[in-house]
Structures are given as C-alpha cells and as structure tokens.
Amino acid sequence: MIKKAAAGFRALLAVLALSFSLLPMDAAHAKGVKEIDASVDAALQGFKKEVKGASEYLAAAKGVLVMPDVKKVGFVVGAQWGEGALRVDGKTVDYYKMEAGSAGFQAGYQKANFVFLFLTQEALDSFHNSNGWSAGAEAGITVVDASTPSASLDTLKAKSSVVAFAFGKEGLMGGWSAKGTKFTKLKAK
C-alpha cells in the first residue's frame, strides 16, 4: 500500500514538473517596450503610494530595476516569471526578464510588483554588465515586504547593496525569496 502511494506521488510530481515546464514563460516576451515602460511607470507609482519612504529609497539608488506583475504559480513544483526595466536617473537603460523555479511545500498563485534598488555603483555595474545575473549567487539581496514596516535607508544599506521591495500582491501564496532568481536582458522590440 505504501509503495503504491509513493509511486502515485512520484507520478504526480512528474506530471506537475512537466506541466510547469510547459508554462508559457516566453509568452510574456510578446510585450513591446512601450507596454513594459507603461507597466514600469504604473508599478513605480504604486511603490510610492504603498511603501513608506519610497521617494527617499528611489533617490538614494544608483539604479532601479522594476519588475511589474511578476507571476508565481506552484503546487509542490513552482515557477515565477516577469519582465521589466532597469532605470538609471529615471531613464530606461535596458529591459530584463526574471525567472525562477522551485520545489517544496507550496501551492497557489500570486502576482506582485518588485522594485530592486541598487544602492552602490558596484552592485549596479555587476548587474548591468552581466549576461545572466542570479540573485543569491552574484549578490545578496535584502527583501522587504511592503506590508511590513520599512527599515531606514541606513539600515537597509548596512544589510546589503541590493534591496528588493515586494508590493501590490494579489492571490495567495507563501512568501518570496530572491535566491535562485535569474535575470537576463531582453532584446528591445
């Protein structure tokens, strides 16, 4: 009986893994730069409304990566994807996609906006000059949930040179970790 249950569970995991591998991660790339820029502008407005001290954080950043409408779906096996823009001095300098996969105890769907602040020129250059930047491998990231009280800018700078804010969440799924998230440049359309 236990062997049958274990075999059934392994089969379920295989089906789920196959299902998630078929998710249309590249379908989002049909967006043009105007649509991405409009989504980034809207996400930045939401960031300023939802996060106390947002204007101060933005002013202190050497660069800001905005990933609006990042989708995360999971049932044991999970996937997360989105695309956005890197802005320096308020101007878009490149477009990026964000992807991650995970396995473990998880179930649900969530959509959220993310703002990554590069607080040092070194951290910004490392990100911008890479061919594929992985959070946790190339740099540690401090993740701040907008629903919790924000730390001071000095406190955040002391923790990490890259700070990510998650806000505008919709849906139900457990927290978010930056570890293993990969960012790659998109070709502008």
Image (cartoon, rainbow, N blue to C red):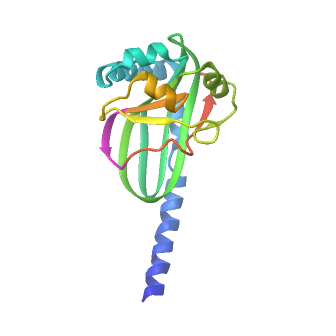
Q: Is residue 13 left or right of residue 121?
A: left
Q: Quadrant of the C terminus?
A: top right
Q: Quadrant of the N terminus?
A: bottom left
Q: Is residue 15 above or below residue 99?
A: below
The total of numbered circles placed on residues is 0
- Report the residue at 53% width, 50% height from top: 101
Residue 117 visible in the picture: yes
What span is colored magenta in the figure?
Answer: 167-174
Residue 113 or 36: which is nearer the viewer? 113
Q: Position of residue 168 (x, y in %)?
A: 32, 32
Residue 54 or 66: which is nearer the viewer? 54
Q: Position of residue 139 (x, y in %)?
A: 60, 36
Q: Is residue 88 left or right of residue 78?
A: right
Q: Is residue 107 above or below residue 152?
A: below
Helix, strand or loop: magenta stretch: strand
Q: Position of residue 65 (x, y in %)?
A: 51, 25
Location of residue 63 (image quadrant): top right
Please tell me whether residue 173 belongs to the stretch shown in magenta. yes
Q: Position of residue 49 (x, y in %)?
A: 29, 20
- Report the residue at 31% width, 39% height from top: 170
Please tell me whether residue 31 belongs to the stretch shown in magenta. no
Q: Is residue 90 above or below residue 85?
A: above
- Report the residue at 64% width, 37% height from top: 138
Residue 31 visible in the picture: no
Q: Is residue 186 left or right of residue 54?
A: right
